[in-house]
Amino acid sequence: MLHSVSSGQLTYGDGRVDEIDDTIGFKAIAMGVVQIALYLFVFRTDPPLGLALLILTTVVTPAYLMLLCITQSLVAAFNPLNLSSVMGRIGFEYLVLLLFFLLCGALNLLLRY
């Protein structure tokens, strides 16, 4: 689905994408590694900046995964121009997806505390 949507097709069907290699799962973990590093090295020393960067990485995570499905290159997937292009092309639906992710995280925190 992410491959179809990031390619500009807003409708998708179940199907096999043969262009995606087996290491894409490990590459998808890179955003989580960046977020953990931000928490460990930035958030603890400067909480406002760390929180802003963590929110920013949360905002770009769906676009990062979409780009990763197309390019399979970490450098291209982390490129800010590519990320903003995907987010702008999808538009309102991207905002709804982001709000859904944030609400899921807030619900998780609410249930834990």
Image (cartoon, grey):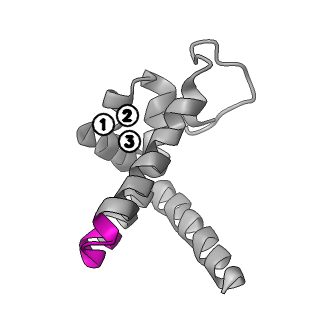
- Magenta span: 42-51
- Which residue is tagged 2? 77
- Which residue is tagged 1? 82
Residue 26 visible to the viewer: yes
Q: Which is in the foreground here, disc 2 or disc 1?
A: 2
- Residue 53 lies, in percent from the top left, at 31, 63
- Which residue is tagged 3? 86
| Residue sitting nearer the eye, 104 or 89 | 104
Residues under numbered marks 2 and 3 in contact, where contact means CB atoms less than 8 Å apart: no
Amino acid beneath label 3? Val
Q: CA distance from mark 2 to mark 3?
A: 11 Å
Q: CA distance from mark 3 to mark 1?
A: 6 Å
Residues under numbered marks 3 and 1 in contact, where contact means CB atoms less than 8 Å apart: yes
- Residue 55 lies, in percent from the top left, at 38, 66
Q: Quadrant of the N terminus?
A: top right
Amino acid beneath label 2? Ala
| Residue sitting nearer the eye, 17 or 25 | 25
| Residue sitting nearer the eye, 80 or 49 | 49
In the rendered image of this protein, does residue 84 appear above or below residue 67?
A: below
Amino acid beneath label 1? Asn
